Image: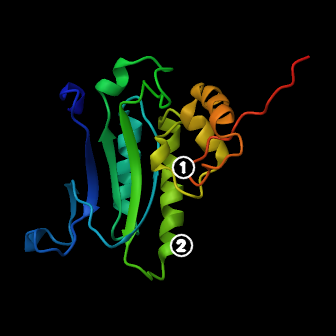
């Protein structure tokens, strides 16, 4: 298992339907497989969480989701994080989430102009909600999508958010750098 992997290793294990690509043997094309691929030129939508462990209930949930998944180009899987990220205290840097060992993810991909794109996005959101009870409640900020709320941004940083908001107030009080998963500058509290 990845828990014994070297601390330098991070890897996505994905459950996907093998695409009809020349690098996939013909007899495997269209079959459900475990893989580590990500084709170019497609539209992508995903939802992820941090998990401290791979509980049996989470694995059963993901396995069931994969069996019922209507998105032909879906990837359900786990990114292993254990190692260097877990060797620092929670407040060492902005990221936090030092108890995270895995990132369960529900990823979808489809051709541009796919007529079922919104239905695919909704299935991904619903599958992600069913995985959340097994997660820490936080996620990697760069894995968030535009439809994630500001509260989700705040939750991703946990206790580090207030410190980051104070730094933002000092160096970017006008919130110029906001076209991202934004940390909003903290309010100046008048001295009494």
Colouring rule applied to residues: rainbow
**Residue at point 16%, 72% (across, down):** 29
Residue 89 in the image: state x and y as whole percent. 44, 17
**Residue at point 68%, 41% (across, down):** 184
**Residue at point 52%, 72% (across, down):** 119
Q: Secondary structure at mark 2?
A: helix
Residue annotated with mark 1: 129
- Residue 150 against residue 170 in the figure, above or below: below
Q: How many marks?
A: 2
Residue annotated with mark 2: 118
Q: CA distance from mark 2 to mark 1?
A: 17 Å
Q: Quadrant of the N terminus?
A: top left
Mark 1 closeness class: few <14, some 14–19, many ≥20 residues within 10 Å: few
Mark 2 closeness class: few <14, some 14–19, many ≥20 residues within 10 Å: few
Q: Quadrant of the C terminus?
A: top right
First of labels 2, 1 by sequence position: 2
Q: Which is nearer the eye, 173 or 72?
A: 173
Residue 57 in the image: state x and y as whole percent. 41, 38
Residue 144 in the image: state x and y as whole percent. 51, 50
């Amino acid at each position: 298992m990845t828990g014994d992997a070297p601390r330098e290793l991070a890897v996505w294990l994905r459950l996907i339907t093998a695409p009809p690509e020349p690098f996939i043997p013909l007899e495997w094309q269209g079959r459900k497989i475990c893989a580590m691929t990500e084709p170019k030129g497609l539209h992508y939508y995903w939802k992820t969480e941090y998990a401290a462990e791979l509980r049996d209930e989470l694995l059963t949930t993901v396995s069931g989701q994969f069996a019922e998944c209507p998105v032909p180009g879906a990837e359900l899987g786990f990114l292993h994080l254990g190692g260097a990220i877990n060797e620092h205290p929670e407040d060492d840097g902005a990221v936090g989430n030092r108890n995270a060992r895995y990132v369960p993810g529900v990823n979808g991909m489809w051709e541009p102009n796919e007529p079922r794109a919104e239905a695919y996005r909704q299935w991904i959101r619903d599958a992600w909600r069913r995985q959340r009870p097994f997660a820490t409640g936080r996620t990697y900020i760069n894995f968030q999508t535009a439809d994630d709320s500001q509260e989700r941004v705040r939750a991703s940083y946990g206790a580090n958010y207030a410190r980051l908001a104070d730094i933002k107030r000092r160096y970017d009080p006008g919130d110029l750098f906001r076209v991202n998963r934004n940390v909003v500058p903290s309010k100046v509290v008048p001295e009494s």
